[in-house]
Image (tube, helix red, strand yellow):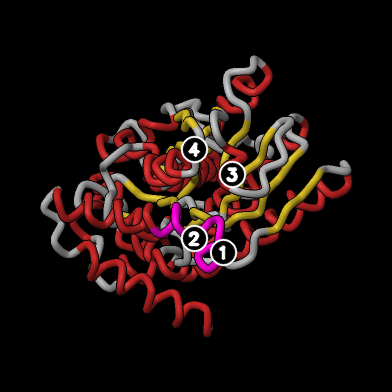
Amino acid sequence: MKTKFACCVLAASIAAVGMASAQAATTLRMAHFWPGASGVNEDILQAWADTVAQESNGDLNVQMFPSGTLAKPDSIYEAAANGIADIGATAQGYTAGRFPLSQIVELPGIATTATQGACVLQTLYEEGHLDSEYEDTRPLFMFTTGPGGIHTIDTDVQMPADLEGLRIRRPTAVAGEMLENMGATPVGMPAPDIYTAMQRGVIDGLSFPWEGLKGFRINELVKYHTEVPFYTLIFVATMNQRAYENLTPEQQTVIDNNSGMKWAAKAGEVFDRLDVEGKQEAVDAGHTIREIENPLQHPDWQAPLETGIENYLTELEARGLSQARDVYAAAQAASESCSAQ
């Protein structure tokens, strides 16, 4: 009888320990807009989630909501801020006017690779230049695409005049103004909507990095590519502040150890690899590819790009952001140091 009682006590103790462990585990919901099968989801965001789970010994689990399934692409940042999502990864430019200083990194000439761009953006944040834009969340890490070019269905774009009258999807208002300076009609829409829009003839082309052409299957629809690096799209992976504060100190340490420049650099490396793969996909398909080197010194492309840079900085100053040119100078300085690294 005593043996049976002891066994019952032991079983109850084991069950209690198991329940305590289960209660200690926390599930964080991450919302983003990339397809689940994309390299960005698998090699950056899911890789981050797997690392967090491993380093917390299973106390932290991340439930992924790709393709805008938890929040629409233009609402993901707000979803993270108000707690609909515990973590959101999104493009700052999807919330027009919300991150004007951060978007300085999108201007031509700041970054020539995703690794460099991620380093520049993360550096500006860590130096305190962008604090006011992220006060309502807890940024984990920031990253960028490689330079975006112009890709069209049936127009061979060799100079800005070739864009006259074309409806080109623009990623952000900053890039949209530059496209307009070149004669195009910019059309705004989230990346997941591009494929259908092109199929229906709503747009004639788009501005995108090579990575996006592969990740969103756009190479299936376009035939002409102009490598004119006139913008870089920026991203942030950020956490709801209350969700972070509700973690145990040990769990917070795991999150902290997987924030900052380490993951910005990893994300940049993935984007650079995906750019190579996206371009090779176009090469293998026999597409026409034009390369415009150093567009800020190119006789045809220089004027509209420099006008776009000046107009954007002037616009920020008119909005009361007197530090805009200082942030631009800091971005240029970070660009040099990040390039050296």
Which residue lies at the image location 54% right of the left edge and 39% below the top edge?
A: 4
Q: Between marks 4 and 2, how big is the CA–CA gap?
A: 14 Å
Residue at the top extreme, as displayed:
200
Residue 1's spot in the image, x, y percent? Answer: 52, 38
Task: Determine which residue is flagged by label 3.
Answer: 208
Q: From which residue to which does the magenta span run?
A: 295-306
Location of mark 4 (residue): 183
Gap in Å between the C-alphas at discs 2 and 1? 5 Å
Q: Nearer the viewer, mark 2 or mark 3?
A: 2
Q: Residues within 10 Å of mark 4 (few under 14, many from 20)?
A: some
Q: Which residue is mark 2?
A: 302
1 or 3: tag closer to the N-terminus:
3
Point out which mark residue 298 bears.
Answer: 1
Residue 187 in picture, x, y percent from top left: 47, 28
Name which of mark 4 and mark 2 comes first in the sequence. Answer: 4
Look at the numbered disc 4 and give the secondary structure of its residue.
Answer: loop
Identify which residue, 147 or 181, lies in the foreground.
Answer: 181
Q: Amino acid at mark 3?
A: Phe
| Sequence-first disc among 4 and 1 | 4
Is the residue under label 1 in contact with that under label 2 (CB below 8 Å)? yes
> In front of the other: label 3 or label 4?
4
What amino acid is at disc 1? His
